[in-house]
Amino acid sequence: MMIDTPVAMKIIAKNEESPDVFTLTLQFMEEKETGYDFQPGQFNMLYLFGVGEVPISILAHGEDNSLYAHTIRRVGRVTQGLSLLKIGDCVGLRGPFGRGWPLDKAQGKDVLIVTGGLGCAPSVSIIHHILKHRERYGRLIILQGVKHSDDLIFRKQYQEWAQLPNVQVALAADISQPNWPGHTGLITELLDQVHLDLSKTLCMMCGPEGMMRATAERLTQLQLPEDAIYLSLERNMECAIGHCGHCQFGGTFICKEGPVFNYPEVKFLLSQRGF
């Protein structure tokens, strides 16, 4: 069920992931909305009362499906205001919106996750889902790239995931500190350092569009079919229901047809400056 009018959510946890990134874990103020659920890859609109609302990917939920985490970067008026809230304060929530990751199609296959920067947030829900239903999927390969090694968030989670069976984690930073445990260079270079059975691999990507485009091109050079690649795109989504037009991408609206797209759907648009 989708909630189309903001309902009150209580902040029950707040974590500072980096100097400009934080995670809010929310719980319904009233009894859990009947039927509310989300698919990994969808997003909610978080409303700061009296200020405005912003689209935020749903990071995860608790074991009883009652807690919802959202990782947010301080970049504007609303997100700056959200960062000032404390445990016990409340925000409004609408959602979930959009098209999520093709996890049913990925069953029985190896899953390659490629993310850049804070783009890792939409991918965390994929990882949680696969680990919760481990018997349905093959190997899980997680590639995370950042501009500077200090930008990496969720460090503890990456370390924990890397210890699990049939899970491989590889990190890359354009610029790194001396103690950086990962690769120094482009994330696309990690594709030459991990074993991929491209005959049974499905790739899901999120992050900067330039990174996703370069990675998709490299994967197709390695003979991964284009229709085995999925991307999560971001735009300025103000209404989330396709009315305002701010998120229009060519002839589609990211809030409705996306944010997850099959690569052939958006390959041409990604190559056009201004879209």
Image (cartoon, rainbow, N blue to C red):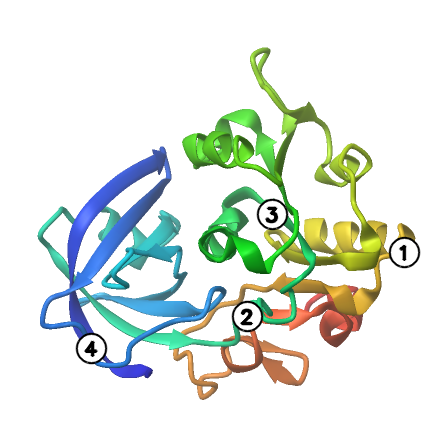
Q: Secondary structure at mark 3?
A: strand
The C terminus - image quarter: bottom right
Estimate how packed mark 4 is, as few (under 14), some (14 to 19) or many (20 or more) residues with alpha carbons within 10 Å.
some
Task: Look at label 1 and name its amino acid.
Answer: Gln
Spatial distance from mark 1 to mark 4, Cα to Cα?
45 Å
Numbered mark located on residue 115 in the image: 3
Mark 2 or mark 3, earlier in chain: 3
Task: Look at label 3 and name its amino acid.
Answer: Thr
The x, y position of residue 83, in whole percent, is: 25, 47
Mark 2 or mark 4, earlier in chain: 4
The N terminus - image quarter: bottom left
Camera-side residue of 33 and 85: 33
Q: Which residue is mark 1?
A: 223
Instruction: Tell me: 25 left or right of 183.
Output: left
Q: Which residue is mark 4?
A: 33
Front position among marks 1 and 3 = 1
Front position among marks 3 and 4 = 4
Numbered mark located on residue 259 in the image: 2
Task: Look at label 2 and name its amino acid.
Answer: Pro
Camera-side residue of 112 and 152: 112
Mark 3 or mark 4, earlier in chain: 4
Mark 1 or mark 3, earlier in chain: 3
The x, y position of residue 21, in whole percent, is: 37, 42
Mark 2 or mark 1, earlier in chain: 1
Image vertical order of residue 137 relative to residue 267, above or below? above
Spatial distance from mark 2 to mark 4, Cα to Cα?
24 Å
